[in-house]
Image: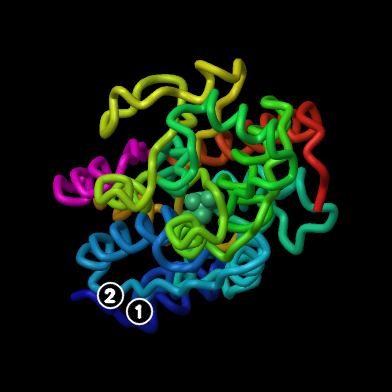
């Protein structure tokens, strides 16, 4: 039976050893739908990954998993909402390199603590971004983009998913390592930011492959380079940014977390269900087609990964002198 109500004897024993209500709560869980807070607008990597995983995990959990888009402030609004939610296993967070590793160094004041406020469940995916431009921009490769930016200082623009998002840092690194001045225009997610390039509101963006690749194939965008260090499977001939800009690398990663204080038993079950979802052939092929590398690891490994990424980005932001928000 899925929704077991604890027997009175079990409940009293739990009370006697001081484990109430976590043990009882964990036994009855999940008794209603779960939600994953996505801190960006629909259409970007965070949303794509959360929807694919949520739909598959809901089968194993026997409950609907809904997606709640709480966009704004580079993901900080959604991250804060998830951090402050009741740690009862019904609110999850789709965290990523921006909210968990970049924003602590980029924002003077962060309304949550990426380490203290969350219980990691699993790293889900990692993927390089893709620099895409409006097809009218006279640039075929990164060298053309850099030359154009130098000849028109302060005139070219890049959109991002918000200040502190992976797409923002990718642009800030282009400015810093390329010694150019392409202006940042933040949106509330990769979805609207990519459409801003298609509509000609901005010149370029470092977009998620799942969002931008179909638009490149239909001729609405032109791909210039990717931000990884080895060829990407969907476009093996596409140049890497670091071929023209030494030291350039931005890997956008995403993972599932719960608010800190969520019962260990619930975390273990969520971990099992999300890792199963990541391993399912249809989720795997969907995510791989969208240019994501499927990962999956243990809560401890994910916690160590977040801590090391946070250190890495603090150094990158300080070294590249990226201004704080
Ligand atoms: C980012 O650029 O940080 C994210 O991919 C944003 C998003 O998922 O929309």
> Seen in the image, is 182 located left or right of residue 137?
right
User: Depth check: 197 or 126 in front?
Assistant: 197
> Seen in the image, is 232 located left or right of residue 229?
left
Question: CA gap, disc 2 to disc 1?
Answer: 5 Å
Write the residue at 58% across / 34% down.
Answer: 304
Write the residue at 28% across / 24% down.
Answer: 236
- Magenta residues, as a range? 279-297
| Residue beneath disc 1 | 33
Circle on res. 63? 2
Pointer 2 local density, CA inside 10 Å: few below 14, some 14–19, many at least 20? some
Quarter of the image for residue 296 reads top left
Return the x and y of residue 117 as percentages of the image width and height. 66, 58
Q: Earlier in the sequence, mark 2 or mark 1?
A: 1
> Seen in the image, is 301 located left or right of residue 316?
left
295 part of magenta stretch: yes
Write the residue at 18% across / 75% down.
Answer: 1
């Amino acid at each position: 039976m899925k929704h077991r109500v604890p027997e009175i004897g079990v409940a009293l024993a739990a009370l006697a050893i001081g484990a109430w209500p976590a043990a009882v709560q964990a036994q009855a869980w999940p008794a209603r739908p779960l939600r994953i807070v996505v801190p960006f607008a629909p259409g970007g990597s965070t949303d794509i990954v959360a929807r694919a995983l949520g739909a598959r995990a809901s089968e194993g959990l026997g409950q609907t998993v809904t997606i709640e888009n709480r966009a704004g402030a580079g993901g900080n609004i959604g991250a804060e909402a998830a951090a402050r939610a009741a740690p009862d296993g019904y609110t999850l967070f789709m965290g990523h390199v921006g909210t968990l590793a970049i924003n602590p160094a980029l924002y003077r004041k962060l309304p949550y603590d990426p380490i203290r406020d969350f219980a990691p469940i699993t790293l889900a995916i990692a993927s390089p971004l893709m620099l895409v431009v409006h097809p009218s921009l006279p640039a075929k490769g990164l060298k053309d983009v850099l030359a154009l930016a130098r000849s028109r200082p302060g005139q070219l623009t890049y959109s991002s998913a918000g200040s502190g998002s992976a797409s923002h840092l990718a642009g800030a690194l282009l400015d810093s390592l390329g010694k150019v001045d392409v202006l940042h225009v933040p949106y509330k997610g990769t979805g609207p930011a990519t459409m801003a390039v298609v509509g000609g509101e901005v010149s370029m963006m470092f977009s998620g492959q799942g969002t931008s690749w179909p638009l490149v194939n239909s001729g609405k965008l032109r791909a210039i380079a990717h931000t990884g260090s080895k060829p990407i499977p969907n476009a093996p001939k596409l140049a890497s940014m670091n071929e023209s800009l030494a030291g350039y690398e931005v890997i956008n990663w995403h993972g599932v977390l719960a608010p800190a204080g969520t019962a260990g038993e619930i975390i273990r079950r969520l971990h099992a269900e999300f890792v199963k979802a990541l391993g399912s052939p249809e989720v795997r092929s969907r995510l791989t087609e969208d240019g994501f590398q499927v990962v999956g690891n243990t809560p401890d490994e994910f916690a160590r990964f977040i801590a090391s990424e946070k250190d890495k980005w603090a150094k990158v932001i300080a070294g590249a002198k990226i201004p704080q928000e």
